[in-house]
Structures are given as structure tokens and as C-alpha cells.
Image: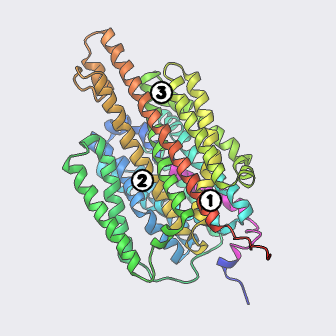
Amino acid sequence: MTATAADTSATPTGHPQRWLILGVICLAQLTVLLDNTVLNVAIPSLSTSIDASSADIQWMINAYSLVQSGLLLTAGSASDRYGRKKMLAAGLALFGIGSLAAGLSQSAGQLIAARAGMGVGGALLMTTTLAVVVQIFDNEERVKAIGLWATVNSLGFAAGPLIGGLMLDHFWWGSIFLINIPVAALGLVAVLILVPESKNPLGDRPDLLGALLSTVGMTGVVYAIISGPGHGWTSAHVLVPAVVGLAFLGAFARWELSIPYPMLDMHFFRNQKFTGAVAGSILVAFGMGGSLFLLTQHLQFVLGYGPLEAGLRIAPLALSVIVLNVAGVGARLMPKLGTPKTIAVGMAANAAGLAAIALLGGEHYSGMLLGLVVMGAGIAVSMPAMANTLMSAIPPEKAGVGAGVNGTLAEFGNGLGVAVLGAVLNSRFAALVPSVVGAASLPAALAAAGDDSERSRISDAFASGLETSQLVGAAAVLAGGLLAAALLARAERADAPVEPVPAA
């Protein structure tokens, strides 16, 4: 009897070309992650070249993240049902076409539509890449492979502003999108040649209503989180999409429990291992996303660096993650410490790095550099372990859905972290300088200041607000790591075999 592609891709020894395939997957992943940050450096050019308003620019950025986050669960489910190779190839094709349309856009509306199309491709890529990694690597090598896959996240964060700045120094703004096309084309050819097909052998019926409910629900919630800082958390602009999104997510959960072929089996949440990974991932993404958002402001507004200089100074974070993951430090620690302790140690280091940035980096970059390196070490140890735990708690045939859950948690936690820690910063800043008009914005407050001493007081107040919000982020990271470790340790104890009592 001939083995199917799904069978051979999950053999105990792994796929014979697994490391080459991982390189292809990481290349595809990198294009998506670069696009999350590269647009930020092009905002001034867009404002003048295509006469984009502030609202237009906000939608150019948000259209991509909204579509991508809303479709992650649906994309993961589609990859399980129709084939992960097919969906990975489709994602690369859509992303490349969307990049071409974005680079050639002549108006703000065209660019917003192109960015939304890129978000569809991004959702397919984000879910299928991790699902394929789970399929082609065995249990022994999977942690190291996921560590290398996770390394691309840090590389994308650090490299996006640098690549964008270099391109804009030599070419027009559309070049930041057109550079995606040869990468997507190369990735597409490599996927078609190298990546084995795999899918759920049960061939569940498509859950179309579940896909609709989850997409509308996630889009509504993420839109509310994105809009909160700008429109106010109690405004109708925020509350209406939040209520609609939560209502649709509630309906999604009820629907998934009532059908025999759910897109996301809600009974996964009865698994303590799964629940621990979910809880930890949300809190960790909350602290990390918000703190990294604050870090860019810290470098530019407090220490006075430009966008490209700030990007260069964040690079040690990515470099430490890359070096330690390539060396396989996390993969070697897990067998010695166990998953719960590995996550606890990594997240404690992560929190310590964030605290060091807050307490030591207020006036000089040297203190921040120490925090960035410690933080990178924590990410390299904990994040692969967290992702591997989440994926291993889900049956292999549902790897696409598992990757969708992992991506959704990251998007939700990052967005919530930016919103909440940004609100902490603004409230602390406004409390320290209540007499200044427009105190919720540092540039506006400085412009309204009467003299140098008042400007100095305003800058000090903003730095104090940053310190407070970064410490809140550090506390969230530490709490998330300890909570996940405790839940996972309890799950391991529950799953441990009971030793028979010797006969008297």
C-alpha cells in the first residue's frame, strides 16, 4: 500500500529535505513580516506623492492587519482541508499580486485596496508556514525548527524599517512593495518543487458559517483595539465594532460546539496544556507588542534618534534572538528543564530585559542595549517552547487551525498591548503635565510650551510615562510566563502515568 503525502510528511525521521524546505518557508514568512513594519517609514513620502491624508495613511496600515487577523482561523482551516502546499502557494501568489498593485497605485484608495489583498495572502502564509513545519519535522527536531521559524519574526521586526529606509533613500515609495515580488516568485517556485502536500485525511466538510462568524468577530475586535487610542475607548467608533465583534465570536463558539465538523474544536480548551499555552501567549504578546511599540518612541522622542537610527539600535534584540536560535539554545534547554521551566526562565529574562530598558535606558542607549540583549535571550528561549506547546496540544491533522490560533493570539495580544500600554503612557503623561494644551501628544505639548524649561519638564514627563508603561509591560510578560508555566506543569502532572501500588 502506497503512503499518502500526509503520511510521509510526518514520518519519525522527518522529511529528507526538511531543512531546505524550512529555508523556503522562512523566506516566505519574512516577506509578510517585513510588510508589517516597512510602511511606517514611507508615511512622509505617501503624504506628498499621492496626497494621502492622516486617515488614508491609517487605513493603509490597518487594512493589511485587519484583513490578515480576521482571516487567520479561516486560512488555517482551509489549509487543513484543501492542502497546506496549495494554500501556501496561493498565499505567495496573492501576496505578490497585491504587492505589484500596491507599488503601482496612483491613489490612496488603490493602495488601501492593494494592502487588503496583501492581507489575504499574508493570512494564508502565516498559518501554512507553521503548519508545514509541524508536518515535516519529527518531535526531536521540531523545537529547533520552530525556533528558527520564530527567529524570522524578530528579523522582520528589526529589518523592516532598515530596508524601507534604504529603499526610500534611493527609489520612490512604491519600491518598498515591488521588492516583495521577486521574493514571492522565488518562494512560489520553491514551494511547488520542494514542499510536500499534506492535509487532514478525514476531509471534514467546510465550515462556511464558522468561517464567516470568526472573520467578522475577529475583524470587529481588532478594529476596536486599533481605533481605541485615537477615538477614545468609550466612543461609539470603538464600542460598536467591539460589541459586534464579541457577539459574533460568542456566536462562533456556540456554533462550533453544535456541529460535528467544527473549524475550531472548542473542546481543545478542556486540554490544560492547550489552555496554558493560550493564556501565556496572550499575556506575552500583550507585553511584548506594547513594549516594542513604546521602545520606538523611547528611542526617537526621548533619546533623539531618527527612524533609521532607531531601527539600527533595535537590531541587537533581533541579533541575539537569531544567534541563540541558530545555536539551538532553547531546543537544548527544553529536555533538561522541561517545557514549563523553560518558558518560566525565558519569560523571566524577557521581563528583566524590559525592566532594564525602562530603568536603565532613560537617558543613555547603553542601559537600553543591555535590556535588549537580555530580552532577546528570553525570546529565544521561551517563544519556540510556547509555540511548540500550543501546536503539540492540537492533533497533527489540525495543524493549520493550530497555526491560525497561534497567529490570532499574537495579533490580538500585540494589538491589545499597543492599545493598553499606549493608554497607560498617555494617562501618566497627561497627569504629569495637566496644564499643557494637547498633553496627550508629545509633539503637540512641546509646540505649546512657553520656554525651554517647560519643554524640558514635558520631555521628562513623557520619559516618566514611558518608564511606567514599560514596567507594566514587563509585569505582563512575567505574569504570562509564570501563568503558562504553572498551567503546563499541572497538565504534565495530570498526564503522568500512575505508578501501580506494589502488592503487600
Label 3 or label 1, whichever comes before in sequence order: 3
The image's colouring method is rainbow
Q: Is residue 129 visible?
A: no
Q: Amino acid at mark 3?
A: Leu
Query: Is 127 placed above or below 30 here?
Result: below
Identify the magenta region.
Answer: 8-33
Residue 10 lies in the magenta-colored region: yes
Q: Amino acid at mark 2?
A: Phe
Residue 55 in percent (x, y) is at: 27, 43
Q: Residue at x 30, y 66 (%)?
A: 248
- Residue drawn 68% across and 57% down? 143
In the picture as drawn, the residue positioned furthest to the left comes out as: 236
Q: Residues within 10 Å of mark 1 (few under 14, many from 20)?
A: many
Q: How far, Cα to Cα, is label 3 from label 2? A: 25 Å
Report the mark closest to the observer, 3 or 1. 1
Amino acid at pointer 1: Asn
User: Helix, strand, or loop for circle 2?
Assistant: helix
The percent position of residue 279, horizontal first and vertical second, equals: 49, 55
Residue 412's disc number? 2
Q: Is residue 302 above or below residue 112?
A: above
Q: Outermost residue toward the bottom?
A: 1
Locate residue 205 relative to residue 23 in the image: left or right: left
Q: Find numbered disc 1 in the image and state the secondary structure of the residue it sits on.
A: helix
Q: CA distance from mark 1 to mark 2?
A: 19 Å
Res. 388 mark: 1
Asked if one can make out residue 201 in the rendered structure from this viewpoint, the answer is yes
The C terminus appears in which quarter of the rendering?
bottom right
Q: Are marks 1 and 2 in contact (CB under 8 Å)?
A: no
Instruction: Looking at the image, tell me whether mark 3 or mark 2 is earlier in sequence order.
Output: 3
x 29%, y 45%: residue: 228
Residue placed under numbered mark 3 in the picture: 299
